[in-house]
Image (cartoon, rainbow, N blue to C red):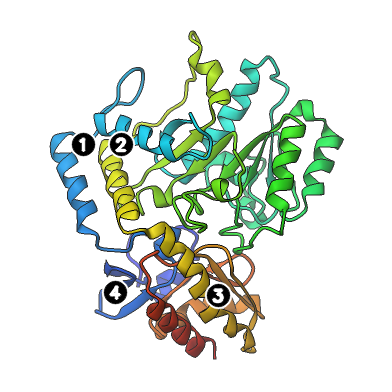
Amino acid sequence: MAGSLWHGFADMGSVSTKGQFVVARGQGTRIWDTDGREYLDATAGLWFTNIGHGRTEVAQAVADQLGRLAHYSGFGDITADVTAELADRLAAIAPVPGSKIFFTSGGSDSVDTAAKLARRYWHEQGQPEKNIIVGRTKAYHGMHVAGTALAGIPLNREGYGELMADAETVEWDNAKSLLGLIERLGADRIAAFFCEPIIGAGGIYLPPEGYLAEVRQICRDHDVLFVADEVVTGFGRIGGESWFASTRFDLAPDMMTTAKGLTSGYVPMGAVFIAPHIAEPFYAGGVWWRHGYTYGGHAGAAAAAMANLDIIESEGLLAEADRLESDLAGALAPLAELDAVAEVRTGLGAVTAVQLADPARAVPMVGALREHGVSGRAAGQGALQISPAFVMTTDEVGELADRMRAALS
């Protein structure tokens, strides 16, 4: 039976009847429930535990920081030393040199921050009529008001009414759809286009060949801000030995939203990377951007992020994401031979989707996976999400494939 906890994205009537799946501990690529059963973590928590579970060096870094200073206000001219240090470190790996870093409490915060800043930027440019924000079908941009309005998952918007005026949606895989919207509404009305390099929660769809370059150029040609939503793909998951998909695909985004892999989920934190030309009006003097979060740039979270980045660098985990790209394709692609599987989408970083032939089986299949020692997740319309920690070995990928085959059979 469920207790007092109201779960996110859940049928609480079902949870109350069937009970909760309670995780007690984790180590590396494995987790254990309260009964001591072990599971391979196929999703790195929720896309985030890139360095694996149980890294005591991150916990120690946070403990040390909390003992010195847990947090302080980041408003006005105040910051913690570790927060300023982290901002400089992130700017040094940013896809656009000279980027500024605005800290948030997570991915949904980052998306809303970018949406507000896009509109405010055009206001400062003397073009306040440029206020339409564009998203894509299947896309997910968090669950705050702007992100929910932008997202292309109708069920996530159901029952709320109009959340945000001036939000539009185009086809996720057709650059001409974006161009058509711009031509129909007028570039002088469109502020920004939000783009996940890989569609994540909407079903794990890789971008069609040339798509990202084409939409990026369309935005340049029509003076529309390009916002790369890298909450899922940031900090190495995309492969190519790149910190970001924006680097791997040379997108040079006007803004980039991040979270998850920034701390590997050890402490909540997000960051928006803001290209110099977007920051310039606000750095020229005399302009206040009245926006921020109590816990934005939290000192303890910044310490976790610094330790997380240290591990990624010292253990060469960007290269490991490349290895996983190959390992996952080799081990999981054969699952497409099963009657229960329609296709396997893989080939770009540590990300794979196993699309079921009957989408209605996806949620029950999560339970079947647990029976075979895999903690997984359903995404989109009948896909099983595979996004392991970068420390998952080649042998463990094979073990994951064997366990999944048994469940799917």
Structural distance between the alpha carbons of marks 2 and 1? 8 Å
> Residue 334 lies in what quarter of the image?
bottom right
Residue type at the position of mark 2: His
Residue at 35 percent across and 31 percent down: it is 294
- The residue that disc 4 covers is 33
**Which numbered disc flags the more N-terminal residue, 1 or 3?**
1
Q: Position of residue 373 (x, y in %)?
A: 38, 82
Answer with left or right where residue 40 lies relative to residue 368.
Answer: left
**Which numbered disc flags the more N-terminal residue, 3 or 4?**
4
**Which numbered disc flags the more N-terminal residue, 2 or 4?**
4
User: Which residue is more in the foreground, 147 or 45?
Assistant: 45
Structural distance between the alpha carbons of marks 1 and 3? 43 Å
User: Which residue is more in the foreground, 265 or 57?
Assistant: 57
The reply to whether dot 3 and dot 4 touch (C-beta < 8 Å) is no
Residue type at the position of mark 3: Ala
- The residue that disc 1 covers is 70
Q: Nearer the viewer, mark 1 or mark 3?
A: 3
> Residue 217 lies in what quarter of the image?
top right
- The residue that disc 2 covers is 298
Structural distance between the alpha carbons of marks 3 and 4? 29 Å
